[in-house]
Image (tube, rainbow, N blue to C red):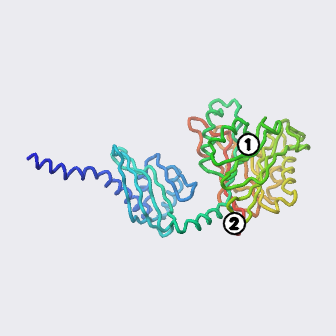
Amino acid sequence: MRYVIALLALVISPIVAAQPEHEVYKLLHEMHEATKAADHEAYFDMFTEDAVFFGTDIWERWPKHKFESLYRPYMEGGNGWWFQMRDRHIDVQPGETVALFDETLYSESYGQCRGSGACRLEDGEWKITRYHLDITIPNGASGDVVNSIREFEANNIELMTFNIRYGTANDGINSWQNRGNTVSALIRGDLPDVIGIQEALHSQILDLEPVLPGYKWTGVGRDDGKENGEYAPIFYNADKLELVNSGTFWFSESPDEPGSTSYGNTIPRICTWAHFSAIHASEPTHFMVANVHLDHQSAESRLRSMQQVKDLLAQDGLAENYPCFVLGDFNCTPDSEPATVLLGNGWKTAVDDENAAGTFHGFTGEPGNRIDMIMIPDRCEATEAEVITVGGGENGIWPSDHFPVRAIVTLKPASQ
């Protein structure tokens, strides 16, 4: 009898051991069936609450709530998508509560591609906690594909403006030491090519440098033209862009004199500008960014400062030769007289009025005045643009008292 029991144990054990793998296989199969049927209820219920979905573009990293907000309406409209599984591998980890998987897929839209990720056992039920969708590239075609991607990226530049609030302010729970990591995480989450930052002190720049790998920066302190006072620094992706030239001038009648004021502003105000070229473009591709921080009290100072920016862009036909973007904290709204020195006169806001939100919120998360903007030349297009009003408020701590603004701009729309 004991030999029969031993034999039964040998037969049953592989079945029991294979059960988690079978359940994960079934879950992934049902996931693809749900997307094919546009069954959003079943589909999103297959993910854990802390799940993350990675799409095919580098910036497509969506926590479940974000992913669902984007694709639930799409699926509710009866739209689905279908990836046919060609091959699948599942590795259940020790403890049998986590399983890793990868699967070869085929789609009419993407051709052959790969899905990979992890599943987790929760309350006796397997759910997806990570899913990565990648378009695979044959080795023989990789050179041409990489060149095509680089050409596309050289013509599409992501800009961001972000007033990060000066680090010595008495902001209580929102002091810099509590929110510095949140600022860098927000920037890394979007990976903009150029970031115009306002109110940064030298110590804050030193804090950001090591946690923004791949970026370099240019700028000076406004008090002495060296390290004292607030900067308006420009950070840039040094793997993609080469800094051709840069400088800082003061909004005053003595623009080259550090710390100068003469327009009714009681503190120095500056503009830091940078001229870039795209490293991997097949033909010379240049653009300029001017990062401004206008005065918060004097309307006269704001107006004359913007006229000074316009004069800069007119020098040597600068704005005619290549795209010039003006971004920053303008301390005035798009319909104000200082802003309309450029807006409506060759420039427009990257975020259109219908989709714009207020950018100053005073650490409350409630949008106030729209004073942070990205101005782009009329001849350029913004393929994406938004005020980033999410991603803050954890434990009452916000990255800043301003929301950042981001935009992806096409330098040469005709060549897109």
Q: Could you tell me the amino acid type at mark 2? A: Ser
Q: Is residue 222 above or below residue 125?
A: above
Q: Is residue 104 above or below residue 14?
A: below
Q: Decide which of 321, 390 is in the foreground and name it.
A: 321
Q: Would residue 211 be found to the left or right of residue 4 on screen?
A: right
Question: Could you tell me how far apart the alpha carbons at marks 1 and 2 are, in whole angstroms?
Answer: 33 Å
Q: Could you tell me the amino acid type at mark 1? A: Gln
Marker disc for residue 198: 1
Residue placed under numbered mark 2 in the picture? 282
Q: Position of residue 399 (x, y in %)?
A: 63, 40
Circles 1, 2 touching at the beta carbon (< 8 Å): no
Give neighbour class at mark 2: few <14, some 14-19, many 20+ (Cα, 10 Å): few
Which comes before the other along the chain, label 1 or label 2? 1
Q: Position of residue 214 (x, y in %)?
A: 64, 49
Q: Quadrant of residue 223?
A: top right
Determine whether the residue tagged by mark 2 lies in a helix, strand or loop.
Answer: loop
